[in-house]
Image: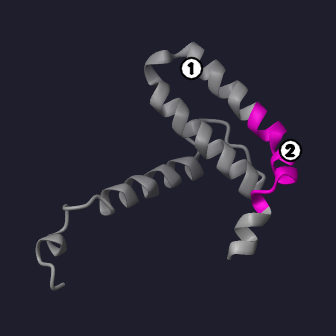
Amino acid sequence: MRKVIRAHLRPKTATDAMPVLMKSARWHTIDILDDLADHQEHAKHYSAAVAMSLAYGKYPQPYSDPDVVAANRCLTCLGVALRPGVRQVDAWPFL
């Protein structure tokens, strides 16, 4: 696992990903300049676009892209599930 992760964090890999990062950053900046009030959604789209383009080679165009919507829904559920103190299990230490 360590070798797989480290292979993607080398300086050579970062230079290979630079065009993808620059394209995503340019679109992110344009989106924010067009609609500043929706900056949180622009940031979500930017992070999803970078992750999907680097991992799968697919750049999501619209905000209603099913893959982006599914990823954001899963991340929201994961964030809620990992919040400490929400579950009853946290109240009983013997569990």
- Residue at (11%, 78%) from the top-left corner? 92
**Residue 92 vertical placement versus 52 (above, below):** below
Q: Where is residue 62 in the image (x, y as percent from the top left)?
A: 62, 35
Among the two numbered marks 1 and 2 on one chain, the one whose residue lies closer to the N terminus: 2
Q: Is disc 2 surrounded by few (<14), some (14 to 19) or many (20+) residues within 10 Å?
A: few
Cα separation between marks 1 and 2:
26 Å
Q: Where is residue 2 in the image (x, y as percent from the top left)?
A: 69, 73
Which residues lie in the magenta part? 8-22
Q: Which of 22 and 60 is in front in this view?
A: 22
* Residue 32, label in figure: 1
- Residue at (39%, 60%) from the top-left corner? 78
- What kind of residue is marked 2? Thr
- Residue at (56%, 36%) from the top-left corner? 63
Residue ID for mark 2: 15
Q: Residue reaching furthest top?
A: 33
Q: Quadrant of the N terminus?
A: bottom right
Q: Nearer the viewer, residue 91 or 41?
A: 91
Secondary structure mostly seen in magenta is helix
Q: Which of 67 and 49 is in front in this view?
A: 49
**Residue 3 vertical placement versus 67 (above, below):** below
Of discs 1 and 2, which sits in the foreground?
A: 2
Q: Is disc 1 surrounded by few (<14), some (14 to 19) or many (20+) residues within 10 Å?
A: some
Q: Position of residue 61 (x, y in %)?
A: 67, 37
